[in-house]
Amino acid sequence: MNATNAIDLLRSDHLKVRDLLAELATPRTAVPRRAELVGLIKRELLVHATLEEEIFYPVFRESGDGEHERLFHEAHEAHRAIEKLILPDLEATDAARDEFRGRAKVLCELIERHTEEEEREIFPRATQALTDAELERVGLRIERRKLELIELL
């Protein structure tokens, strides 16, 4: 794993979010911790999605063919659904209610499906289409922008 390779950085974010989601999905997680976890997950997802949409996805889209275009649009729509529909609904739900667990499960499933598609389809295509040096340059841009975004949120 290369510390500044764009794909390695994005995979690392996926692992962090998966860990947070796993804790959220645990029935034993205390109600106050659930609300805190939703805030942490939201922050991680917003930073990650911004990095992908501002930096990685445009480079990926331009590096390929119509299939890259299709994957770009699907990934963008998954982010939109998570950010505009699922997360706000979960945030507005009392963490002590049964509905919270159901909504958290839907969020977990959608994110898992999206990250699997990225890791199975987008990342391998990007690795084929871009040189190691290009992935390093994109990774450096991601690292710099991530620091900026963390400061803002």
Image (tube, grey):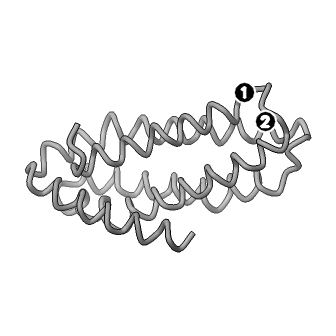
The quadrant of the image that shows the N terminus is: top left
Q: Which residue is mark 2?
A: 102
Residue type at the position of mark 1: Thr
151 left or right of 1 in image: right
Q: Secondary structure at mark 1?
A: loop
Q: Which residue is mark 1?
A: 26
Q: Position of residue 94 (x, y in %)?
A: 88, 49
118 left or right of 49 in image: left
The residue drawn where x is 43% and y is 52% is: 74
Quarter-of-image position of residue 141 = bottom left
Q: Position of residue 37 (x, y in %)?
A: 69, 46
Q: Secondary structure at mark 2?
A: helix
Asked if residue 9 is positioned above or below residue 21 in the image, the reply reads below
Tell us which disc is closer to us: 1 or 2: 1
The residue drawn where x is 22% and y is 60% is: 138
Residue type at the position of mark 2: Gly
Front-most of 32 and 80?
A: 32
